[in-house]
Amino acid sequence: KASWLNEQKGSFSCADKDVRGVSTNDVLTSWFMKTSRASAGLMTVNARNRVTGLTSAHAGNYQVTFLYYPEEFAEPCDIRKSVDRFSASNGNDIKTGRGERVAFISSWTQFYKDFDATVFTTGYSDWLIG
């Protein structure tokens, strides 16, 4: 619910971690990884507009996956800090092994756009909207 998310977003003070605030994705990622009791978590991050020369105008999948350990996903502030610096690992020596839980989360909602099939030439649009 939106009220729960807004409450969560407002309840974290991230100043001690050099983070100004947290996003909905930060809250949900931290919550999901903690709730799943994962010994490691993976989050896919869009690389567009974060890597030199790669913009939202480029077609295709440009992504990196961050590996987090529990102390790195303990709070939404930790997730935000890793996204801001475009790196998750703090260099610890924790390793996951057989039988351990791993959580994976991905969000592509930022790419949503209405699709206009009328821009296609005759034939293609007939096939698309059938």
Image (tube, rainbow, N blue to C red):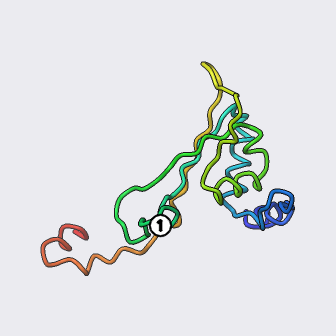
Query: Which quadrant is home to the C terminus?
Result: bottom left
At label 1, counting other C-alpha atoms closer than 10 Å, the crowd grade (few under 14, some 14-19, many 20 or more) is few
Q: Residue at x 85, y 63 (%)?
A: 15
Q: Which of these two is toward me, 101 or 64?
A: 64
**Residue 36 placed where, x, y %?**
70, 37
Q: Is residue 86 left or right of residue 22?
A: left
Query: Which quadrant is home to the N terminus?
Result: bottom right
**Residue 52 placed where, x, y %?**
46, 64
Q: Is residue 111 above or below residue 121?
A: above
Q: Residue at x 55, y 56 (%)?
A: 107
- In the image, farthest residue toward the top: 98
**Residue 7 placed where, x, y %?**
83, 64
Residue holding disc 1 = 111
Question: Residue 102 sits in which quadrant?
Answer: top right
Q: Residue at x 77, y 62 (%)?
A: 19
Q: Which of these two is toward me, 127 or 96?
A: 96
Please give the count of numbered marks on the rendered protein.
Answer: 1
Q: Is residue 6 left or right of residue 127?
A: right
Q: Which of these two is toward me, 7 or 49?
A: 49
Q: Residue at x 52, y 63 (%)?
A: 50
Does dot 1 land on a helix, a strand or a loop?
A: helix
Question: Residue 67 sits in which quadrant?
Answer: top right
- Mark 1 residue type: Phe
**Residue 114 placed where, x, y %?**
41, 75
Question: Residue 103 sits in which quadrant?
Answer: top right
